[in-house]
Image (tube, rainbow, N blue to C red):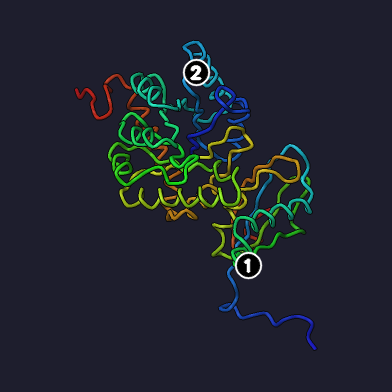
Amino acid sequence: MKKRLKVSIPSLRERERYIAFEIISEGEIRYEELEKSIWNTMLTFLGEHGLSKTSIWILKKLYNEKNKVGVIKCNHKALIQVLSCLGLISRIGEVRVVFKILKISGTIKGLNIK
Amino acid sequence: MAFYDFHVHSAFSEGESSLEELASMAKKLGYKGICFTAYPLSKTEESFLKNEIERVKKEFGIEIFLGFEARNLKELRALAKRRREFDVLLVRGGDLRLNRAACETPEVDILTHPEFQRQDSGLDYVGIKFASKNKVAIEINFREVLFSSGKNRSLIIKNMAENVRIAKKYKAPIIICSGGISHWELRDPRCLISFGCMLGLELKEAKDAISKVPEEIIKLIKERRSENWIMPGVKVVR
């Protein structure tokens, strides 16, 4: 029995957007805190139903705690909602933050982040 | 595309951050210019602020404008009389009479948060018609949404969307500002554009609200600085 689902054909696949962001803050931001903050803000602002439509995912492997640069994946229709929610995050834990959007692309390769 | 934030409070008004901190953050976020908003000051404080703005402008290399925000009718009349001495005239919305007076005054550039601390949107279609005629931009203040929650936030968003809907119908200018009182309250232009889209603006309209509308105001500022300018709509043609 197969362990993974069969990859869907391109016409059925959801179109994705990858948002590269940089966090401007005074202190360090751990991935766990960042993830919690983004999910909670989106859940409050969009609700469970609204959040389900965004297909949001924060890419753990691409988050650099040193530079505070990370990538969020969402579907192309929910880009507006996700960007608005990032603007609504003013604190992560006790640290005041501002999100700077570096680039938005359809592929991770297109983001050109190192 | 050049982005501008025309409603930022510094330590000279009710803000917490210095001019340097605000200018530095605005530059990091990719703004081409910002407007430091203050409440009417004494002559000495005003000239000191103007000198500070000139210094910060040279240091950070971004456009900085000086704006005064009128909090009542008396301040509005006084500021309108000496319109040539500063760049941007804003009116703090919230009061129905003041909202209407701001829309009817051609000297005013921006009516800030007309729905401030109100149950309704603060503007009717007649007021917005005047705003369209006098080119008074209706502000969407992001800070109001940022620091509210639950029922209050949803009411604010509903009122903002109502203003946007009527302003679009009568082609009144809409401007999106962070309204921050600290440099931590400035927001990325793309976040503000997205928020504008959520309120019912088309993508182009939302982009214009942060770039073209401020540019129009800057054009008026430059016109006003010229010797030929007398009052809105009147200038010497040689």
Question: Is the residue at mark 1 from the same chain as the one at mark 2?
Answer: no
Q: Which residue is mark 2?
A: B50
Q: Can the viewer see residue B227?
A: yes
Identified at 42% across, 31% down, the residue is B91
Above or below residue A105? Residue B146 is above
> Would you say B171 lies left or right of A74 here?
left
Residue B94 image-quadrant placement: top left
Give the Cα separation between the discs numbered 1 and 2.
Answer: 50 Å
Q: How many marks?
A: 2
Residue B17 place in picture, x, y as percent: 63, 28
Residue B175 place in picture, x, y as percent: 43, 42
Which chain is mark 1 on? A
Residue B210 place in picture, x, y as percent: 46, 43
Of residue B98 and residue A78, the one placed in the foreground of this image is: B98
Of residue B10 and residue B105, the one placed in the foreground of this image is: B105
Q: Amino acid at mark 1?
A: Ser
**Res B22 label:** none
Q: Can the viewer see residue B2?
A: no
Residue found at the very far top of the displayed protein:
B44
Which chain is mark 2 on? B
Q: Secondary structure at mark 2?
A: helix
Q: Amino acid at mark 2?
A: Lys
- Quadrant of image for the C terminus of chain B: top left
Of residue A41 and residue B83, the one placed in the foreground of this image is: A41
Residue found at the very far left of the displayed protein:
B238
Above or below residue A53? Residue B206 is above
Identified at 32% across, 39% down, the residue is B131
